[in-house]
Image (spheres, grey):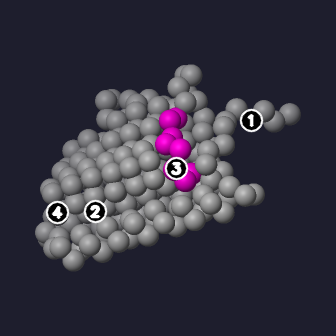
Amino acid sequence: MVIEIGRMANGGGMLYPYQGIWPEIAENCFIAPGARIVGDVKIGAGSSIWFNCVLRGDVGVIRIGERTVIQDGSVVHVDSGGFDTIIGSDVLIGHMALVHGTTIENDGFVGMDATTMDGSIIKQKGMLAAGSLLSPGKIVGEGEMWMGRPAKYNRDLDESAYKALAKGAKKYVVTADTYLKEYKDL
């Protein structure tokens, strides 16, 4: 016998409690099928969590702002040693990223297959390049791009880079809204 303890979110992803605490998801968020969100997680309006992501707010909290995009296969977790995960608004997290006990400020970017570790911070408009590893406690400064394993400062981003990242995030907001409308009728 299989007993389903979760609740389905907008879009088909699943929400699960941990120690009686359920995730809180804004009404117009898209949580794709296969996504799992557990425990003390709050997600702001217009954000989207894509296929097969896992967000575990079990031994700490996860807070996600508005219009933030967490792409397919990403994992967002916390650390019981006091490192919650706080993600601002208009953040774009690429496919297969691992975000662990990290703060990402508004307009931040984490590239595909990148990893952030406990106590690391990505400041506003900061970027961690694809495939990079941000070591514990490291800080990507405002408007900086870091890359490598371990990640190190590479350069300051210019206005065209900001615009390209913002455009990508906005496209995902529109795509998520399309999915929500389409899935509503199923």
In terms of sequence position, does the residue under pointer 2 or pointer 4 come before the other? Answer: 2
- Residue in view at x 39 percent, y 66 percent: 170
- Mark closer to the observer (4, 3): 3
Residue 135 shows up from this direction:
no
In terms of sequence position, does the residue under pointer 3 or pointer 2 come before the other? Answer: 3
According to the image, label 4 marks what residue?
143
In terms of sequence position, does the residue under pointer 3 or pointer 1 come before the other? Answer: 1
Label 4: element kind? loop
Q: Is residue 3 above or below residue 156?
A: above
Q: Which residues are magenta?
A: 23-31
- Residue in view at x 24 percent, y 70 percent: 162
Q: Is residue 144 above or below residue 54?
A: below
Q: Residue type at mark 2: give it.
A: Leu
Count residues near mark 2 (Cα–Cα under 10 Å), then give few for <14, some for 14-19, many for 20+: many
Label 2: element kind? strand
Count residues near mark 1 (Cα–Cα under 10 Å), then give few for <14, some for 14-19, many for 20+: few
- Mark closer to the observer (2, 4): 4
- CA gap between label 4 and label 1 equals 44 Å
According to the image, label 2 marks what residue?
128
Q: Quadrant of residue 6?
A: top right
**Spot occupied by residue 118 in the image (x, y as percentages of width and height):** 30, 42
**Spot occupied by residue 76 in the image (x, y as percentages of width and height):** 44, 47
> Which one is in front, 73 or 163?
163
